[in-house]
Amino acid sequence: MMAEATTQMFDRDAQTMPVEQRREQQQRRLQELLARVQNASPQHRQQLHGIDAREVTLDNLHELPTVSKKELREYYPLGALCVERGDLRRIHATSGTSGRPTIVAYTERDMEVMGRTNARVLDAAGAKQGTLVHNAYGYGLFTGGLGMHQGIEHLGACTVPISGGMTQRQVTLIRDLYPEILLSTPSYAATLADAMAHEGIAASANSLRVGIFGAEPWSEGMRASLQAGLGIRAMDIYGMCELQGPGVAFESLDSPGHMFINEDFFYPECIDPYTGEAVPEGEVGELVFTTLTKEAVPVIRYRTGDLASLQRIDDPGGRTFITMSRIVGRSDDMLVIRGVNVFPSEIEAVLLTDDRVSTAYTLVIDERGNMPTLTAVTEPMPDVPASQIDPMLGQLQHALKDRLGISCQVVLSPPGGLPRTEVGKAVRVKHWRKGEDSPFPGLLG
Ligand code: DLL
């Protein structure tokens, strides 16, 4: 399967283009973009004020101001639009925690890029014309479902557009239709794995070969759990609505741990989130992207808030795109517990390397006292003997202290007692504030 995916690579010329030649293409696209958008919207006019677009190159791009989600929100709903409304073909949005959603829009060409980049993602996972793909990303305003759908159709594969939720029906359809590829958030894939185990369907007995998981943070521990629980290769996909949706970067079967960035469309930089300076290759910083060809709502130096590192690798499959690591955290997800910075994904990484606990967990930050404290609520697997529970808790707490540098209490809920993701993204962190009831009555407080 691997060799075939390599020899018959979809969009091979673009994916294997020599780096220097691609840089020229990026340079050309950057200049076209700047010339096109400079006066096309109030957002772009403000961001590019006083800048001579003809002088901007990939080498001095870092001197342009960045733009953040907060700044884009000021142009809600379509104040950053750079084309006529009549040229739009689709609108997506994210719910947004601050009340105002982020609206994104696409022209026909933007849709074509969405299809093409996601066809690359699927191809890198071994999909071909006719491959059956079970698409459990949410359909609707969220970009996941329809964005991947676009890629499946572009590749000529076949979709089961099931969306999220109704897990029982999903298990039945996977059993009856024999899809080879599963698309979903990692937390929903865990829900499906639990449901299949509950039905007595062994991991080796289902038809799935590969899962392409993203849209929320996950860890290598989760990867191992999903691979074992579903009998698949679990691959990472990264994206965000402001850039397009899914399909910004993807792993291939040959490149676990490295996601190729579709950098002919999304030009990446990695900066120190505090100073804004570029960080050296291989070091973790905040990802910043410029959408080189986007027409409807292009972004220039968009600060994603996502922390990862960039690295050029020698890809056995021949792709020449720069790669990014797994997302290690978001600058705004960082918990500061007694002065120590902690990312929820670090805690997941520790919990899920222990296969005596399930993939369901919730972190509770107890903020009722002067000093916040951290508790991880998880579940033992049903087959863990009672005599092992106490030693297991001790080992987990020890491993967490080792990794995080602060204490994290571990509390067990009865097997199956924690909420499972059904639709949307997993909510892993709960803040317990003064005057509020315990988020887990009977277990905490
Ligand atoms: O989540 C787009 C998407 C759909 C990506 C399907 C992958 C698959 P948003 O709803 O705008 O878009 O959320 C974007 O989700 O800034 C990251 O913080 C997070 N995220 C996305 N992919 C990953 C990943 C879609 N593979 C935000 N690992 C991003 C960790 C991810 N976090």
Image (spheres, grey):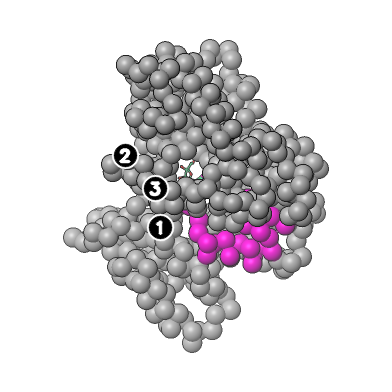
Q: Is residue 101 among what the camera can see?
A: no
Question: Which quadrant is the C terminus positioned in?
Answer: bottom left
**Which callout, 1 or 2, points to the residue nearer the camera?**
2
Q: Which residue is mark 1?
A: 344
Q: Is residue 39 left or right of residue 435?
A: right
Nearest to N terminus: mark 1 or mark 2: 2
Residue at (24, 55) in percent of width and height: 434
Label 1 CA crowd tier, 10 Å (few <14, some 14–19, many 20+): many
**Callout 2 crowding tier (Cα within 10 Å): few <14, some 14–19, many ≥20:** some
Using residue 14 as the reference point, say whether residue 36 is left or right of it.
left
Judge: label 1 CB < 8 Å from ligand 1. no
Q: Which mark is residue 285?
A: none
Quarter of the image that includes the N terminus: bottom right
Residue 85 in the image: state x and y as whole percent: 54, 14
Q: Amino acid at mark 2?
A: Gly
Whole-angstrom CA distance, mark 1 to mark 2, is 24 Å
Q: Let me know if residue 220 is in the magenta part.
A: yes
Please determine whether, in this image, residue 45 is positioned above or below residue 320: above
The reply to whether callout 3 and callout 1 are in contact (CB within 8 Å) is: no
Is 116 or 74 nearer to us in this picture?
A: 116
Residue that carries the numbered disc 3 in the rendered image? 280
User: Is residue 396 located in the magenta-colored stretch of the structure?
Assistant: no
Tag 1: residue type?
Pro
Q: Is residue 124 visible?
A: yes
- The answer to whether 87 appears left or right of 206 in the picture is left
Which is more foreground, mark 3 or mark 1? Answer: 3
